[in-house]
Image (spheres, helix red, strand yellow):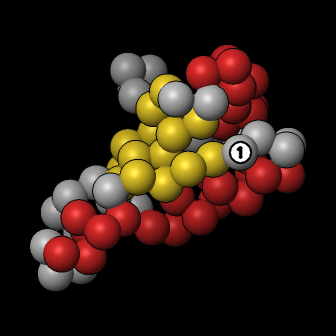
Amino acid sequence: MKELLRTNDIALIAYVQALLRAEDIDVFEFDVNMSVLEGSIGILPRRLMVRSADHFRAAAVLREHEVPLPGEG
């Protein structure tokens, strides 16, 4: 598993999940429970993870849709 995106923007998470699922790329959301435990005020980011073999293609899909990736500004 590789981290694709880390954010506390719930709308962005839903958008990215929809994009990747449309391309038949499995995406896994990590840290959901930690986010809920902190009171849902959005301090703790959630991570979107993909299989290592899918990471390159998933990143390409996000770039194509102008979703900023970590380290790319």
Q: Which residue is most to the bottom? A: 39
On screen, residue 53 above or below 50:
above
| Residue 68 visible in image | no
Q: Give left or right: position of 16 versus 29.
A: right
Of 48 and 41, the residue lying toward us: 48
Find residue 64 and report its horizontal and vertical position in percent. Answer: 74, 32
Residue drawn at (49%, 54%) of the image: 29
Residue type beneath disc 1: Asp
**In terms of secondary structure, where does tag 1 sit?**
loop
Residue drawn at (69%, 19%) of the image: 53
Q: Give left or right: position of 42 versus 71.
A: left
Residue drawn at (63%, 47%) of the image: 27
Find residue 16 and report its horizontal and vertical position in percent. Answer: 63, 52
Q: Give left or right: position of 39 versus 18.
A: left
Find residue 69 and report its horizontal and vertical position in percent. Answer: 48, 31
Which of the 4 quarters of the picture holds residue 18? bottom right
Residue drawn at (59%, 36%) of the image: 50
Find residue 73 and report its horizontal and vertical position in percent. Answer: 40, 26
State how many labels appear: 1
On screen, residue 25 above or below 71:
below
Q: Give left or right: position of 39 versus 24.
A: left
The residue where tag 1 is placed is: 26
| Residue 29 visible in image | yes
Q: Residues within 10 Å of mark 1 (few under 14, many from 20)?
A: some
On screen, residue 61 above or below 42:
above
On screen, residue 36 above or below 1:
below
